[in-house]
Image (spheres, rainbow, N blue to C red):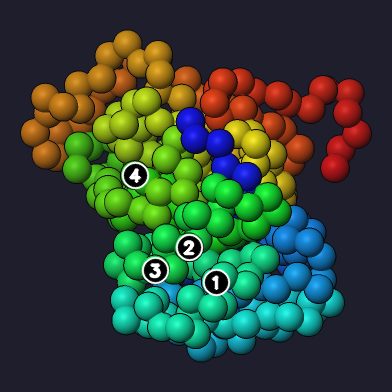
Amino acid sequence: MQKANGTLIPIGGNEDKGIDADEMYTLEFIEEGILYHVVREAGGIDSNIVVIPTASSIPVEVGENYLTAFSTLGCNNISVLDIRSKTDSETEHAINLIKKADCVMFSGGDQSKITDKIGRTSIHTILTERYFNEKGFVIAGTSAGAMAMAKEMIAGGSASESFVKGAVKMYKGLGLIPELIIDTHFIKRGRFGRISEAVAQFPKLVGLGLAEDTGLIIKNNTFEVIGSGMVIVFDGRKIKHNNHKILREGTPMSLTNLKTHILSNGDRFNIKKKRVEVLPIEAPFI
């Protein structure tokens, strides 16, 4: 595992995709303090925050929502970088914003838009280099923005067809955290089977299912859970039976000895050692 000096904050999201009132009007996660954690990790209210709403189908409205949300927390140095093509990712304006940012925040929507329009561009290179080399540099993302952080990215898949080969569609993500596969809206949308198939395809990786209003602070090869919900960890290292490779598309899968952990606020997981550190039972409720 390559050591990164920066910080990743993937968030489980609480907005629907597309033109939807939830995405347009909800000031996401401010109630549970997750945006507060983003600001704190970036260096405080004077930090330079760049919001990228590329994944959204309503990027102008979503960008304005984030301007309002971060301003509510007292931030005064916020920019929206509205990237709608690879050409936009190569402009001097975009490159300068990313070079100067203390925190880059990706919105929700469709994660494939992020990889199609930003992946393998100059700002993708700058983001990656800064994340691995600069202590204190933060990349945050909700929903699609969280899922795109992985190298092996879940691009889609029906929860109603869970545990059937081919139900999950995989695509190459930004590769910021190659050891993980991230899924979001996990509890509400019943995505247990979707990430199980993803882990069956890549059993050496750790699958993470993030509930809404829930996030992770990932740094120094360890993540800590923040927010009000749960994170389900899927560790496939010791799977004993995995018939994914031999099945036809549409055939039900079987997996045995897929290890899972259910973590909540304050719990930690060492990604390199795959070791859990939970709060003691007698710890006060947060």
* Disc assigned to residue 152: 4
- In the drawing, what numbered circle is on residue 40? none
Three-letter amino acid code at the position of disc 3: Ser
Question: Reading the chain from its start, which is encountered first: label 4 or label 1?
Answer: 1
Mark 1 or 2 closer to N-term? Answer: 1
Compute the Cα span from label 1 to label 2: 7 Å
**Residue at screen point 46% across, 25% down:** 235
Q: CA distance from mark 4 to mark 1?
A: 24 Å
Q: Earlier in the sequence, mark 1 or mark 3?
A: 1
Is the Cβ of the residue at disc 1 closer than 8 Å to that at disc 2?
Answer: yes
Q: Quadrant of the C terminus?
A: top right
Q: Is residue 237 left or right of residue 280?
A: left
Q: What residue sits 36% from the left and 16% below the top?
A: 239
Please tell me which residue lies in front, 21 or 89: 89
Which mark is first along the chain, 2 or 4? 2
Mark 1, residue position: 98
Residue 122's mark?
3
Q: Contact, CB < 8 Å: mark 4 with mark 1?
A: no
Image depth: mark 4 or mark 3 in front:
3
Q: Residue at x 61, y 27 (%)?
A: 270
